[in-house]
Structures are given as C-alpha cells and as structure tokens.
Image (cartoon, rainbow, N blue to C red):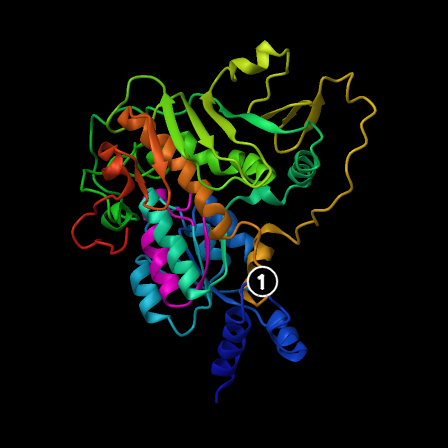
C-alpha cells in the first residue's frame, strides 16, 4: 500500500470515528493524524477568500480555484505549486483522490454547489457565511454534512474572540436574570447599488459564465463583479446576510437558540433586484428547557435601534443588547458592559468556562484530523444561517409567517416557497433543495 493511501486512510479513520471524538482511535493514530498535513483546495481566493487561504496555509495547499485570474493573482503567486483551476467541478473531479479538505469563499449564490459536491466526496468543508443563498440550500448542506460525517466550519471568525466568550458566560450565569428580549444590529446603509446603464465586454481575466453559476443569465457589469454582488438578490443576501451570522452568533450561543417560530420584517419599499439600505426583522423563539421564550429584533440601521436612546445607552456601530429581568448587557465583538452601571459597579464576573480557541481555522483543521468538532460546525450554524435568511424572505415578500422548521415551510404562507426552495439555471440543477 502506498504512503499516500495509508495517509488518506489514517485521516479518514480519525474523522469517521465520530465528530469531535479523539478517544475512538489509538494514541499512535491520533498522534500521526495530528502531525500529518491536510491537502486543502480553496475555491474563491480573492478578497475574503485570500484571508481564508492564509488561514489554512499551514497545511498543504494543493489546488486553487477562481473564476477571476486577476483577483486571484496574489494567492496564485503565494502558492506556485498548487494546481490552478477556474471550474471547481473540474478541480474536484481531477483531484478527488488528492484532496482532503475544501474551503469555499465564493459569492453566496455559489456556496451550495461546490460545498455539496465536496462533502459527497468525503472532503471536510470550511464555508463562508451565510452558508448558502436560500434556506433549502442550508438544509441540504446540513444534511450532507451529517450523512458524510465530515468536519465543517462556517466562517464566523469572531466566534473565537475572547470578548464573545465572556459575554456568553455572563448571560449563561444569569448576570442579568432571564432574557426575553434581544436587540441586534449592523450599522451603516449599504445596499441599493446603481442600476447598470452600460454593459462592457467581459474582461479577459474573468470567466463570467462560471461566475454566474446557477443564477439566471444577465449581461456582465462591474456593478455585480467583483464585490457589489452582495447587494443583488440573485447573488447575495445584503447586509443582513453579510453580518447577520456574525452578530446573531452572540445571542444564538448565549441563549441556546435554534429555530425561530415566527418571522416578520419591515423596511423601505422592496426592490425586486437589489437589497435595501435598511430593514428590521422580528423573530420569535420558543422556550428552551428552563429558558423562557425570546423575541430577537434585528436591525440594519445607520442610526442604531431606538431602544438604545430610550435607555440612555451608547450607540455602538454594530452590537447586541440583551434585556434581562435583572438588568441589561450591551456588547459588540470587543466590548461589553452591564447596566444599570451603579447596580453592577461591584459585580464579580463568573469564572471563565469557555476555553480559548486554538485559532478559528485551526479548529476546523483539528476536527478534520479527528479532534473535537469545530465551534461553528454546521449543526450549530445551520439554524442560525437559516434564521438570517428568513429575515430577508419576510422582508422581500412582505409576509409575516409562522415557521415550521421540521417541514421547512411557512405555515399557510405559500408565497415564501420560491425563496425557500430556489430554481437554478439549466445545467446547475441541484437535487434535495
């Protein structure tokens, strides 16, 4: 048996022994697997993708894939030994036996296709938020991950921040009592990009047809590529999708949230093609064990939610306000404070119980080698991504609806179905969404 086959079998053994269970294998295999480097392929390597390539650069980068040669250039230059591709399908087909793990950092509308293909081949998957472009796609990603038992991680890098750990410990220690109300927001007014008026030739360095992927055909415009795709519904999920998984990660973790049961949204007049400059969403969550029901309010707002001014609280650019029976906790990714200030002036915080992260990308690599499950695996982050996307659905359809998470549908609200289970351009059909 070749060294390559032996190595692959060893990594597979540790991974399939059970997610997050080191003790299922012998000490010798555990040690060998931890020392072995994964062979990693990265899909989408410009922009945020470049940061993810750097995050896994301690492993073997064996393949790099991007539809834009110019935007991907620096990553190509840093890893000259990696095979270079434009089409992820060709890369995975040709290198199936060589690749152990895949990183997907493409626009939102092209997460599910490479993600599912990679996992079905048994490849561990790191995927940028918000996991997928539609709720049906999120569920498919979760289902395939569970079936294949691969290690997964959603790109919620701030989950590893020390301040987030301390906030979660405070809420779980009931520093402010029972929490029944949360306000979370992202600042700014990004959205509604200009409608294209001219359509130049596609640049020679861009494979625009591959960039479109499953989306309906439309003429090329720099208003879509390389970045403004985020604010077009066909490709992105707006600021709610861009920041929702990061910011809602704080209350999701602290309050053990999973699936909401009711969603409603308000905002400016809906544009069929472009995401808004502002919106508000209200989610209702049921009781969880001895934790009471929670109303979670999400805002995309330039001025901050009114609740801050009403309570004389400072306006953080983005953040979370927990309202409890015994006080309030205001935080962002780097700061936290309990209110009223005089009540908590002598408060002794609980003991630290959440361990430091070895590094966000490193968590996933360790999990792929048979170690503990990464903190933002799809079992945890899938429902959160689903909740974020449901806010967009409520806004776009103008529908307030009860959500049946088991059936993956709105109760007596068929109008939302096309946004939950999308259709794809010919040649990009996907079963199970």
Front-most of 341 and 163? Answer: 341
Q: In the displayed structure, would residue 16 be above or below residue 270? A: below
Residue positioned most to the left? 426
Q: Is residue 127 magenta?
A: yes
Which quadrant of the structure image shows residue 421? top left
Residue positioned most to the bottom? 1
Q: In the displayed structure, would residue 68 be above or below residue 230? A: below
Residue under label 1, please give it: 20
Q: Position of residue 381 (x, y in %)?
A: 48, 46
Magenta part of the protein: which range? 105-131
Relative horizontal placement of residue 96, taking residue 30 as reference (left or right): left
Is residue 47 visible in this depiction of the protein? Answer: no
Q: In the displayed structure, would residue 181 be above or below residue 113? A: above
Residue positioned most to the right? 346
Which quadrant of the structure image shows residue 225? top left
Relative horizontal placement of residue 221, taking residue 13 as reference (left or right): left
Query: Which residue is located at x 40 percent, y 63 percent?
Result: 147
Disc 1, SS: loop
Relative horizontal placement of residue 359, taking residue 403 as reference (left or right): right
Q: Position of residue 302 (x, y in %)?
A: 48, 18
Front-most of 342 and 161? Answer: 342
Query: Which residue is located at x 71 percent, y 30 percent?
Result: 175
Q: Is residue 110 magenta?
A: yes
Q: In the displayed structure, would residue 90 be above or below residue 164? A: below
Q: Residues within 10 Å of mark 1 (few under 14, many from 20)?
A: many
The count of marks equals 1
Relative horizontal placement of residue 111, taking residue 200 as reference (left or right): right
């Amino acid at each position: 048996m070749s060294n390559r086959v032996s190595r692959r079998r060893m990594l597979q053994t540790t991974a399939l022994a059970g997610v997050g269970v080191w003790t299922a294998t012998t000490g010798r295999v555990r040690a060998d697997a931890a020392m072995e480097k994964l062979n990693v392929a990265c899909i989408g390597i410009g922009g945020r993708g470049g940061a993810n390539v750097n995050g896994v650069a301690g492993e073997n980068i064996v393949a790099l894939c991007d539809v834009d040669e110019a935007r991907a250039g620096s990553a190509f230059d840093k890893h000259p030994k990696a095979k270079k591709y434009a089409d992820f399908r060709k890369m995975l087909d040709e290198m199936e036996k060589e690749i152990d793990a895949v990183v997907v950092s493409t626009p939102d509308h092209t997460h599910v296709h490479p993600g599912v293909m990679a996992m079905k081949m048994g490849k561990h998957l790191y995927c940028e938020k918000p996991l997928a472009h539609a709720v049906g796609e999120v569920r498919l990603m979760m289902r395939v991950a569970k079936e294949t038992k691969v290690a997964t991680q959603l790109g919620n890098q701030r989950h590893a921040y020390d301040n987030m750990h301390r906030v979660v410990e405070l809420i779980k220690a009931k520093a402010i009592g029972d929490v029944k109300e949360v306000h979370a927001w992202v600042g700014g007014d990004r959205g509604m990009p200009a409608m294209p008026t001219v359509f130049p030739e596609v640049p020679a360095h861009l494979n625009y047809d591959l960039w479109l992927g499953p989306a309906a055909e439309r003429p090329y415009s720099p208003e879509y590529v390389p970045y403004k795709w985020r604010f077009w519904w066909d490709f992105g999920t707006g600021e709610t999708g861009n920041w929702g998984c990061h910011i809602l990660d704080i209350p999701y973790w602290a309050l053990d949230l999973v699936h909401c049961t009711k969603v409603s949204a308000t905002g400016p007049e809906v544009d069929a093609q472009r995401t808004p400059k502002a919106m508000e969403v209200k989610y209702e969550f049921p009781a969880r064990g001895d934790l009471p029901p929670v109303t979670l309010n999400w805002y995309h707002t330039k001025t901050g939610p009114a609740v801050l001014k009403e309570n004389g609280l400072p306006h953080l650019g983005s953040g979370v306000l927990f309202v409890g029976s015994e006080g309030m906790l205001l935080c962002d990714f780097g700061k936290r404070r309990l209110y009223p200030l005089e009540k908590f002036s002598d408060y002794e915080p609980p003991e630290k119980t959440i361990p430091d992260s070895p590094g966000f990308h490193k968590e996933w690599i360790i999990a792929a080698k048979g170690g503990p499950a990464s903190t933002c695996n799809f079992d945890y982050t899938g429902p959160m991504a689903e909740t974020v996307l449901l806010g967009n659905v409520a806004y776009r359809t103008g529908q307030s609806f009860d959500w049946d998470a088991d059936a993956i549908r709105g109760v007596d609200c068929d109008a939302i179905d096309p946004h939950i289970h999308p259709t794809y351009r010919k040649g990009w059909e996907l079963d199970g969404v």
